[in-house]
Amino acid sequence: MQILITTGIFPPAIGGPATLAVLCGEHLTKAGHRVSLICQSEDLHHDDARYSFPVLRLPVRAPMWRRVSSTVSAIRRAARTADVVFGHGLSVESALVRKWLCDTPLVSFVHGDLAWEAAHLRRWTEDDFETFQRRRYGWQIETMKRLRSFAMRTHDRLIAPSQYMKNTMRNWGVPEEIIEVIPYPVPAPATLPARRVPRDSASGLNVLGIGVLEIRKHYEQAIEAIAPIAGARLDLVGDGPERPRLEALTKQLGLEDRVRFWGRLPNEKVWGLFRDADVLVHPSQWENLPVTILETMLAGVPVIARPIGGIPEQIEDGATGYVVPGNDAGSLREALERFAALPPERRAAMGERARAVFQERFSFEVVMDRVTRLLERCAKRQ
């Protein structure tokens, strides 16, 4: 197949769609398909020779009318010779091409709600994801909602990473028959770190948190949750606008020797932290299907998280971790104390079960095989 990948962000930009576009492009190229990629970029001057497929970067800083026009034109030109367009972003521009300019099939991963993200970016609303789906707004937000729904309905197939996201998309008016649930592909490191033997609760608990330090992730709850647990330590990996407030909270609670802020780390160092972690805490109040939890399962580490988005589809409550309702530090603390009270062999069994579930349902090979077969079914046959 000749496959055109489109994405709104691409390395060195950081984010799920950027990472996913690279993973899919490299895998599909190695499988013998011809891949090209179009992205928007802050800086057009990058050495893209490292990738096994050609990359066309378009300026993201241009005025909106010019940016949309140039992106639509570029996608149209490339799509004419492609068998399928595989989207990880630029869904509205790709939909315009598919609707009126080119009959090449269009398949996209849906990472979230474009209208909600755009409304938050413009500070038109502070509503959470669930509230945004239910409420009616003024003409600006409602126009973005209609544009998002138009783009989704124009696709030949959509990939929802979770059943939760599929249900949300159905409420946008997207026909159920064009939505397929396929999780994100997560590649394993070259060598999985050896897990240390879990210690008993008297030795303290090593808690890990990984993610962007932003308000909706609620990492202040993780800090407050470990405070009364004797010997508990928290490693926070990631950076973001909430970091100064979280550091101030750590100092206020006198936890400077028990909470470490690592900032952004290369993958190999993150996997090293997995080796020594007893449990990962994920207090976020909005998620689709968090890749962090998938990586944690692959590492053989149990997870404590909220029943948000697709998380209940990842965690087997009581078997691979705990799904904890609520939005407060107290519920996390109770779950951590319950986990700490387990005998070491029971905690080890939870981690082993988490890794087994990952291999059965979420491994890179399993997921990419499903993605490839979907693209082949949709591809335009010359």
Image (cartoon, rainbow, N blue to C red):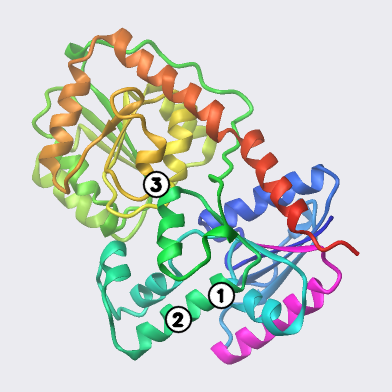
Q: Total marks drawn?
A: 3
Q: Which numbered disc flags the more N-terminal residue, 2 or 3?
A: 2
Q: Which numbered disc flags the more N-terminal residue, 1 or 3?
A: 1
Residue sitting farthest toward the right: 382
Disc sitting over residue 146 in the figure? 2
Q: Disc 3 marks which residue? A: 310
Q: Find out whether the residues at labels 2 and 3 contact each other: C-beta distance under 8 Å.
A: no
- Report whether residue 270 is seen: no
- Residue 332 is left or right of residue 215, and the answer is left
Q: Considering depth in this image, is 247 or 84 the residue closer to the camera?
A: 84
Disc sitting over residue 356 in the figure? none
Give how far across and how far down residue 377 sits, in percent.
75, 53
- Report whether residue 29 is seen: yes
Q: Quadrant of the C terminus?
A: bottom right
What is the secondary structure assignment of the residue under circle 1?
Answer: helix
Q: Considering depth in this image, is 65 or 371 the residue closer to the camera?
A: 371
Q: Considering depth in this image, is 263 or 122 the residue closer to the camera?
A: 122
Which residue: 56% across, 72% down? 153
Check residue 7 for magenta coloring.
no
Per the model, the C-alpha gap separating discs 1 and 3 is: 23 Å
Q: Name which residue type carries label 2.
A: Arg
Q: Which numbered disc flags the more N-terminal residue, 1 or 2?
A: 2
Per the model, the C-alpha gap separating discs 1 and 2 is: 9 Å
Check residue 85 for magenta coloring.
yes
What is the secondary structure assignment of the residue under circle 2?
Answer: helix
Q: Name which residue type carries label 1.
A: Ala
The magenta segment is: 63-87
What is the secondary structure assignment of the residue under circle 3?
Answer: loop
On screen, residue 51 above or below 330: below
Q: Disc 1 marks which residue? A: 151
